[in-house]
Amino acid sequence: MTDRALALQFLQSVLVLAGAPLLAGWVEQCRAWLGNRRGAGPLQPYRVLRKLWRKELVVAHGASWVFRGAPYVLVAAMIIAGSIVPLLAPILPLAPAADAIALVGVFALARMVSALAAMDIGTAFGSMGARREMLIGFLAEPALLMVLFTPALISHSTSLAAIVRQLAATHLLLYPSMAFAASAYVMVLLAENARLPVDNPDTHLELTMIHGALHLEYTGRHLALIEWAAAIKLVTYMAIGIALFLPWGMSATGSLSGIAFATGLLAMKMTAAGAALAFIETLLAKLRLFRVPEFLGTAFMVAVLGILVHFLLGT
Amino acid sequence: MIAQVGHDPLDLTLAACAIWLVLAAASLALSRRPRALRALFVGGSAGSFLFLTAGLRALFAPASHMTLPFGLPQLAFHLHLDPLAAVFVVLFGFTSVAISLFAAGYLRHEPTAHVARMAGQYHLLLAAIGLVLLADDAYVFLVAWETMAWSSYLLIISDDHMVQARRAGLLYLVTEHMGAIALMLAFGILQSATHAGLAGYAFPVMRATTLTPEMASTVFALGLFGFGAKAGFLPLHAWLPEAHPVAPSPVSALLSGVLLKLGIYGLLLVTLELLHAPLWWWGIVMLVLGLTTALFGAIYSAAQNDMKRLLSYSSIENIGLILAGIGLTVLFEAYHMASLAALALMATLYHTLNHAVFKSLLFLGTGSILHATAERNLGRLGGLIHRMPWVAALLLIGSFAAAGVPPFNGFVSEWLLLQSFLGATSFPQPYLNMAVPLGAAAVVLVAGLAAYVMVKFYGISFLGQPREPALKAAEDAGPHERTGLLLLAAGCLFLGLFPAWTVDLFRPAVAQLIGPAAAQDTLAGNVFSCRLHAATQADYRPLVVLGALALVSATLVFLLRRLAPAPLRRTDAWNGGHEARTARMQDTAEGFGQPIRHVFASFFRMQIERPAAAETTPVYASRIEDPLWYAIYLPIVRSVSRLSEWVALLRRRRIAIYLLYAFATLVILLVLTP
């Protein structure tokens, strides 16, 4: 049992690490198709990473150890987050390291580190990106926690494994409160992963950037790590969404056939979720920065409604 | 008899208080010798260490009592050391060890007369704080409380040539005395209910008496006001952002780290110890007040430009969270939900200790910056990480701790607090069930804002390019200062990484206030984990998080060096292709706070000066003021001065008028006498 759990943990961490660029590439490919372009194929992020890895590392004068260390901490934080969320079976040995609240905390740590790194060189764009990123952070974090509280109240535990076990065990029983939580979650996911309508991942104009402005000064392997971390973050957010709102099909015990089935199903869910994300992004236009608080405020209120519905219906 | 001395922690704490008093007296004799004066602070630090060890032993010892032959006739000084007091003894001992050491180095640039005065007042303050914690009757408590208020007042106005310092000191003193009057009334009511005469002032006698709900609520309200004036609950917070910036940094650290916590100690003492059957609505009052205070503090600290003001608003925020924790504890206790009350109390105590450690660290760090640069305005700092590597590295730990991110200590107590909010789902009143979890949302918003504030504080002061040429000559902190900062940073890491051990420190105090059974079964865990009750699976293992972070980062560094050994080249910043790049293009503190001012515009009383379109030397300035100052404090000032005008009407310059007053008084008294 423990051997199997360890093997599963290893499998999941590797899946998240290696598969993250594929999901990012898939989303881009779908966006290209929806935009009537041919696209570079879902493997493009791997090529970008390989290119960046080989390139010379250029660091600005005046960059301190905060700047140079940040990419490593970022990737490490994202790998931890990606290794904790139950993907295939809720029996991960690393899962007790952090519950839902601590997971949000790990994301907050990553955000702080990247904001500080952006301020390290002392450019106008860096500090602008840092303050925008922190603005989105403090607005999105409460919304995200409120989303996580609904399933936590349903399963009387903030442990993600316990939540998944509880939700996956109820055969397609629909919780009305979870519908609210799900819609709020999608909004938070868009904001936290620098997606439209909050941030435009394709922009080249620095003044409109949020996430991009944070990493303007990074090159070479540092930039590769940051891009990779962003991909892992997206896949982790997708995984949290799937674990909370579509947990069915996960293997309860971690048997070999169960894992194989769960892996196949997960691939399908991720493909569908990636396509849905591209679809949503294609429909939306970017919001002005100061409309973002309204957007995230709406997400927060919807999540709170979910909690109230939970209490009103008593389920 | 001598063999017993040293066995009882209470003796050790008294010895520490005696050391401090001796040091305070010695400062008078040594007032011309700067080195000796600074050595006094090292001695004070040793006294604090003694105090700390006594506290650690008292945590796991039965409460001890002692009567000293001073005080009023029929009311000797009652002293005690029980687990609740011991938690605060540990808090005070640990932070003051570091603060005193820091002060020994910090004061080397100050004029000798100044140091001599501070040494006396500082050690008197330490002794008074110690005595507040040891007091076991209302008389000693108030004597120590007032000594504490006076000596801290004198320390705040150390730089009394500054008008701001004198004004801040006066505001502090008035607020403290308003609070002290409320406390006297509260203790008076408690004493009169015991019907035991002077002996009724002793806390054990008060504890044995049960008050009627009306009387108990009056005592609660007076206590909340009195201790709130010390802790800085809304709207009694106004002295904090005025007093902290003008006080010398070790004093700011002591104010924020320890003195505010004594307000928390007093509130716990009155609501959960002396009034042992709290009413549910007290909890609601404290919960709402606490969350409001926390939000207020967080929003205002994000808008500050002075680094010490920013930190003092952040103290208001943390005090608010602690008050919310007490409110939750009282609410659970009132409904006899003991295990949840125990959890909420642990969260409260944990956050109190955390805040003491990281806020002292941050305030001491601002002291080092202040000495190196003579600048408190964040907008004139920048790039200090290159000149002050030690302070920068240690304050990074403090900033992460204050922002409440794992695996640092601020996160653990926020985690516990959120867990206790989430547990609040089985009250007999359904609307409470719905309303209380929403408090968790406020806590998270506050935590998110705290992260914003800390990025602002750290990023603007330590990172980026130096905004003033003078900063390039800044020097790192000296060995004493480094040791003090290092101790506190180590405290942040310990409290963050070993929550299960830390929680064990609070268990006896929780057993004392809530009940032994609840204290035992809440938060099971071993070194690695901090787990709620055995039934739930919610778990947090900071050591694993840190270990994984370190392991993955190290592996990546190693692998990338091996697999992608591209050389590193230093060059000018890319900056989006713009060539000109000066230090003035970075965000100032105002610039970094701009989104906050925009989002929370309706919370501020704000004046903005915008330059006209064609101005050649454009000036942009925004001034943010506290609306409560205008809504509450100034009306009070106005009505007091109007009242004194009326009183002045009675005053005539002729002696005949005064004789008439005396005669009239006599007549009235004769008429009234039966």
Image: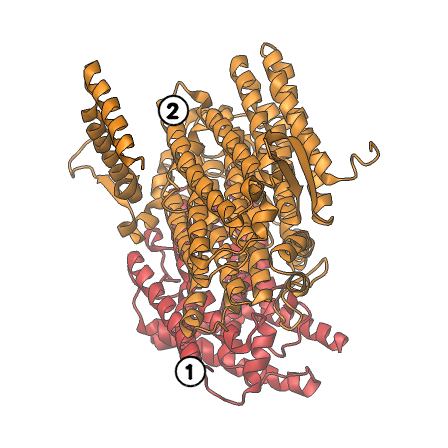
**Circle 2 SS class:** helix
Give the number of the disc on residue B607: none
Q: Are marks 1 and 2 on the same chain?
A: no
Label 1 crowd (10 A; few <14 / some 14-19 / many >=20)? few
In the current view of this chain or complex, which residue is farthest to the front? Answer: B674
Q: Which of A204 and B551 lies nearest the eye of the viewer?
A: B551
Please tell me the colour of chain A.
red
Instruction: Answer above or below: position of A11 versus B362.
Output: below
* Chain under disc 2: B
Q: Residue B514 appears at what percent x and percent y?
A: 60, 59
Give the quadrant of residue A89: bottom right
Q: Which of B50 and A313 lies nearest the eye of the viewer?
A: B50
Is residue A212 in view?
Answer: no
- Chain drawn orange, letter? B
Q: Amino acid at mark 1?
A: Leu
Is residue B421 in view?
Answer: yes
In the rendered image, which quarter contains the N terminus of chain B?
A: top right
* Chain under disc 1: A
Q: Residue A270 appears at what percent x and percent y?
A: 51, 78
In the rendered image, which quarter contains the C terminus of chain B?
A: top left
